[in-house]
Image (cartoon, helix red, strand yellow):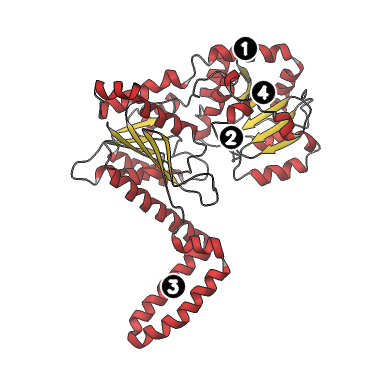
Amino acid sequence: MKKVTMFVWNHFTNDARVNRECTTLAERGYEVDLIAIDDPKNPVISAYEEISKSFRVHRVKRYPWMLQAYQDHGKKFLLVVAGVQVAIIPSLFFISFTLMAAYFMSLVLAAGMIKIKKMRKWFINGAIITRMIVKGYIQNADIYHANDLNTLPQAIVCSKLRLKPKPLIYDSHEVQSDRTGYNKERIKRIESFMLKFVDQMIVENHTRASYNEEIYGFYPKTLYNYSEKYDIHTKPKINLHHKIGINEDEKILLYQGGLQQGRGLELLIKAMDDIEEGHLLFIGGGKLTQELKNLSKNSSEAHRIHFLDKVPFQELPSYTREAYLGFQVLQNICFNHYSASSNKLFEYMMAHVPVISCDFPEIKKVVNETKTGLVVDPHNAADIARAVNKLVKDEALRNSLSENTKHAKEIYNWNNEKAKLIDIYDEFAPLTSKAILLNIN
């Protein structure tokens, strides 16, 4: 069997896209090893996980031993280290002043890495990258696959710094050169340089592929972020109303996903002042979690706003199906948002939940063509409230949109999209018919 090594810069607990890609390749007949990051705060996940006989996850340690000891023991660790140094440094003075000075400087650097946030981040990320490279290199895979720019250096080293270089696929889930919180020009220079080592690039949709052609001069492959196809009625039922403490007849207005900047989440809370019926529920976590909770507490509709922690992607459909409608109201704060065709839209569709969506090209096209929701101005809380009120007052309209999702999901699903991924892989490392048949059987 041909071997694939993938890299992803997360814990691989909620990455549905990467899971779909790895599972597809494993089912095709490839041996897939995914290298992710361990989470010492999460006892549920392990350093090694076997998803199937052909799909394994390797999680490298997040913290160097010194930082991990500091995380675990805090001041006690520092006191022990200080005590040891009282004995070591005077001894080194009698051996060599230069040696003592060098040792002392290394201690200062170590202290900086522990106490100075920016230095600590660089040190931690450097350790993660090094461990990923070591783990990936010894895999000696037939194909290497980097998910997003922050794993591309690791994949370049593992695939190209060899006597016989291996094919490298760069799967960019985001528009790296135009995202919030990133220096556009610097990222563009970095990505442009690294693309010289890439054999094939994948982006999420044709809007992003056209943008890529404008700035880099070539049109990459597209792989839409469609949800896995399933029958929502086969998913386990949960009593979501009970979980958030509301009556069974109340309507749940759902946002699921990361609580991050530029997703219109503050406006959803503001819109609740004008939304006449229903309870707003956020399922997920992120940098805005506490800020959103504070906003909701200060809202006159605080009793109708609820939060649940993120749910593993395998369990999420059971929560989604309980919603009356779902929100996908990204804001146009960068091209990455404007060009998105995010998985959330198709997760709602697969669970037969109508959507209130932003009016950006990729998302608007799907919603309008399939008649599975209402399109709004995502920067206007009043427009969002108007659309919600239209659906909560007109259950016949809502049910019609829900019925349309049953037809739309026959088109917009991973079963129809995954052949494109298989074609890309088979181009670089074609499997024998025997290997494919053995895996199927």
Q: Earlier in the sequence, mark 2 or mark 3?
A: 3
Q: Residue furthest right?
A: 300
| Position of 76 relative to 304 (above/below) | below
Camera-side residue of 279 and 193? 279
The image position of residue 86, as x and y in percent, is 47, 82
The image position of residue 161, as x and y in percent, is 24, 47
Kind of element beneath mark 1: helix
Judge the density around disc 3: few (<14), some (14-19), many (≥20) Cα neighbours within 10 Å.
some
| Position of 408 relative to 333 (above/below) | above
Residue at 56% across, 20% down: 350
Give the number of the disc on residue 107. 3
Q: Amino acid at mark 3?
A: Leu
| Measured Cα–Cα span from mark 4 to mark 2 | 15 Å
Q: Amino acid at mark 4?
A: Leu
Q: Residue furthest bottom?
A: 94
Q: Earlier in the sequence, mark 2 or mark 1?
A: 2
Q: Which residue is mark 4?
A: 325
Are the residues tagged 3 and 1 within 8 Å (C-beta)? no
Inspect this view and state whether residue 199 appears: yes
Q: Earlier in the sequence, mark 3 or mark 1?
A: 3
| Measured Cα–Cα span from mark 3 to mark 4 | 56 Å
Residue 304 lies in what quarter of the image? top right
Image quadrant where one finds the C terminus: top left
Give the number of the disc on residue 403. 1
Are the residues tagged 4 and 2 within 8 Å (C-beta)? no
Q: Which residue is mark 2?
A: 257
Q: Amino acid at mark 1?
A: Glu
Camera-side residue of 314 and 18? 314
**317 to the left or right of 118:** right
The image position of residue 137, as x and y in percent, is 29, 46
